[in-house]
Image (spheres, grey):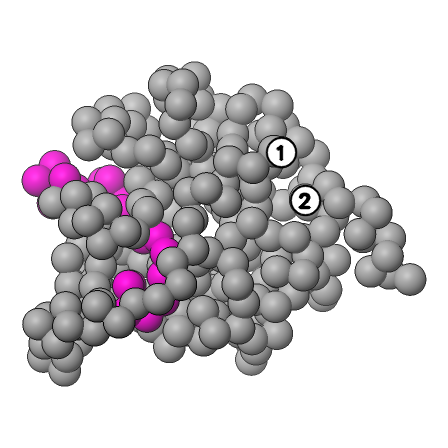
Amino acid sequence: MSRLEELVAGVRETVERRRTEVPHEELREQVGTRTGYRPFSEALVRPGLSLIAEFKRRSPTAGEIRAGADLAEVVAAYERGGAAALSILTEEHHFGGSLEDLESARQRCSLPILRKDFTVDTYQLYEAVVSGADAVLLVVPALEDSELAELYEEARALDLDCVVEVHDEDDLERALAVEADVIGINNRNLHDLTLDVSTTHELMTQVPAGKTVVAESGYETREQLEELERIGADAVLMGETLMRAEDPEATVRELTFDEESTREHHL
């Protein structure tokens, strides 16, 4: 079993457990009370490279990232620093996330929020809406073609934007087949967790004009982000670098090229 298959199997078990706790029909009824939709995809296409700042407690590759992290403090710092959007991990077993983290982030900031998880069941889409997400992640290699199409269509019907994540040419073809508007290019191979930042450069040339591209994994420096902007990426998703930063707000400012605000922050 590859690491991706292991991760997805764990998510499916978690979904079945939660479905017994809160029936799908009950979630459907709660969707009608949703207020304050924040357009996620629109936040990614403002001038310059948009930064999606991620809150995650740990990961399979990095282990514990920021022990005792205060979500409210971190997401507020991201927003003050100039992040365009948030990504909140909700996968429990390997990333230490939760729907409670998503709900708390919604209450603590005004940025649009991506629910970062392995979305494999329409039940999770309704959870995302009820918990305050504006977008969800669809990882192409984790899904069959029929599942990807169904989840994408249902998400759009619920006014959830989708980041459709790809890792190679085959994934990209499948993402384009469902007419995905936002393509996430992950430099990490989820089957063996190896990292190759050239992946984004290679796949960028094959993404049709008019699509929004989000680069994911392996980015740490301003120079790397400047290169992403040069090759035409619209946004970058960063988690570990920001979570390890002593001052997340200042780090976001530096990475978003807001030199004046960075100077003011240090005065």
Mark 2–mark 1 Cα distance, whole angstroms, equals 9 Å
Of circles 2 and 1, which is in front?
Answer: 1
Q: Which residue is mark 2?
A: 256
Label tally: 2
Q: Which residue is more in the foreground, 185 or 183?
A: 183
The quarter holding residue 67 reads bottom right
Callout 1 crowding tier (Cα within 10 Å): few <14, some 14–19, many ≥20: some
**Residue type of the residue flagged with mark 2:** Thr
Q: Quadrant of the C terminus?
A: bottom right
Q: Is residue 47 toward the left or the right of residue 36 in the image?
A: right
Residue 256: x and y, percent? 68, 44
Q: Which residue is mark 1?
A: 48
> Which residues, given as a range, are shown in magenta?
128-149
Tell whether label 1 touches label 2 (CB within 8 Å): yes
Q: Earlier in the sequence, mark 2 or mark 1?
A: 1
The quarter holding residue 60 reads bottom left
Q: Is residue 267 toward the left or the right of residue 50 in the image?
A: right
Q: Residue at x 61, y 23 (%)?
A: 230
Residue ranking furthest to the bottom: 21
Instruction: Please determine whether, in this image, residue 74 is positioned above or below residue 5.
Output: below
Callout 2 crowding tier (Cα within 10 Å): few <14, some 14–19, many ≥20: many
Q: Residue at x 62, y 33 (%)?
A: 48
Q: Residue at x 40, y 63 (%)?
A: 36
Instruction: Please determine whether, in this image, residue 114 is positioned above or below residue 206.
Output: below
User: Label 2's element?
Assistant: loop
Q: Is residue 133 magenta?
A: yes
Residue 203: x and y, percent? 40, 23
Residue 227: x and y, percent? 63, 28
**Residue type of the residue flagged with mark 1:** Gly
Q: Is residue 162 visible?
A: yes
Q: Residue at x 81, y 52 (%)?
A: 262
Number of the label disc, if any, that sits on residue 14: none
